Amino acid sequence: MPSICLYFQLHQPLRIKKYKVFDVGYDHNYFNDASETRLNNKKVLEKVVKKSYLPTNEVLLNLLKKYPKFKISYSFSGILLSQLKEDFPEVLNSFKKLIKTGRVEVLSETYHHTLAFFYSLPEFERQVKLHSQLVSKLLGVTPKVFRNTELAYNNALAIWAEKKGYKAILAEGWHTFLGWKSPNFLYRPFGTKKIKLLLKNYKLSDDIAFRFSENTWKEWPLTADKFARWVDALNGNAEVVNLFMDYETFGEHQWADKGIFEFLKDLPRQLLKHPDNDFVTPSEAAERYHIKDVLDVPHIVTWADTERDLSAWTGNEIQRSAIDFIYALETQVLKSQDDSIIEDWRRLQTSDHFYYMCTKWFADGDVHKYFNPYESPYDAFISYMNVANDLKLRINSQRSKTK
């Protein structure tokens, strides 16, 4: 009896503008360029809102009304929620309508969509707390399940999540650590006692998220009934099928004219045709299903690229240089007690900045170009380091004022 767990990640960063060395010391507005469409965060988000968020929300609200067994889950970055609150309140309200149905779960993550857990545990915990407070204030819910930025996961993160009282945690169901085990069961992370681990079925998830409109794919075109048959075939050898993907899959990554919305509209009907199928949220899956085995993941695994590690963000020297520089400022930033400096520092931790510096040009190259406003990884690095140096000057200036 496979239950289907549909989880969607929602995040759009505040991209850094083309910040020149001559701007250092003079311009403290880092995150928007009104003259450049690709670097105008409001325009980028407006495009995503129109193509993806609003039409997908409309489809899902109708599906929730039509199918009482249908359920979904979201994880919103705080960066996105703050942009929606400021510039697109009607979109935020449309998400609230979905949540009010009582069949939508909201998950916990870092406010600024960062990799802070692997660089500064105290800062990571502050960002998780900020996220929880924002979700409670804007959406009226308290998250019970944790997912880290880019699904970055290891044993240590699960141990932390259990100590903080989370019921479950999400990760990529990657074969290198799964071995013969199936991602379609719940596991106990190594070193924990009761928290449950939900693993993404990456093959079925990526069939929708990445291969849906690929006309060279042998399974193209993908229809809802064909997909449902693949899920049905797991009956007797699966308890929960976790379909995890970016929300932009619908309308942005996979365009409307490719049939992605028709696929989504028909998916619950086709899946629920089988009497043993139903839908669950991550919390419900954790409550319903028992742990199958202990799973040991000592090294970091993510849901990105063919390696499924942190190399998309830290795989080259410029990425490591940038991320080390920004986290080295932590003590000085917090001592400043300047809210604008602290917020800018946290925005500079957003994982997207380092992703744009990736120099992979082979199997994962096209993925790294998507939503990338820079002409090259080196342009992204130059703008980033110029901004980081300006931030450091502001910290030093603030320190001299308080002496």
Image (tube, rainbow, N blue to C red):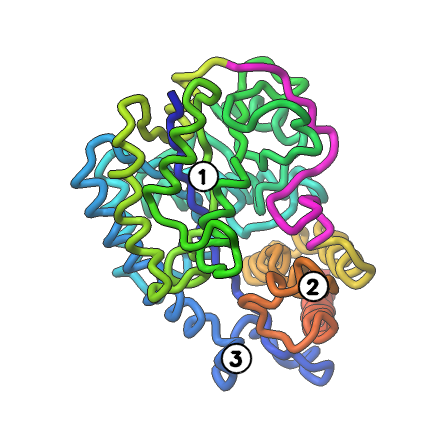
Q: Which disc is residue 243 wearing?
A: 1
Quadrant into which the C terminus falls: bottom right
User: Badge 3: how crowded within 10 Å, few (<14), some, or many (20+)?
Assistant: some
Cα separation between marks 3 and 1 = 36 Å
Question: Does residue 297 lie above or below 364 as drawn?
Answer: above
> Tag 1's secondary structure?
strand
Main secondary structure along the magenta-highlighted residues: loop
Tell me if residue 49 can be seen: no
Lower sequence index among marks 2 and 1: 1
Between residues 159 and 270, which one lies in front from this camera angle? 270
Say which quarter of the image contains residue 289.
top left
Q: Nearer the viewer, residue 174 or 379?
A: 174
Q: In this rendering, is residue 295 above or below 101?
A: above
Q: Which residue is mark 3?
A: 33
Q: Position of residue 241 (x, y in %)?
A: 45, 31
Mark 1 surroundings: few (<14), some (14-19) or many (≥20) residues within 10 A: many
What residue is shown with label 2? 395
Q: Secondary structure at mark 2?
A: helix
Taking the view exactly as shown, the residue that stands out farthest to the left is 66
Q: What amino acid type is highlighted by mark number 2?
A: Ile
Please provide the residue range marked out in magenta: 291-312
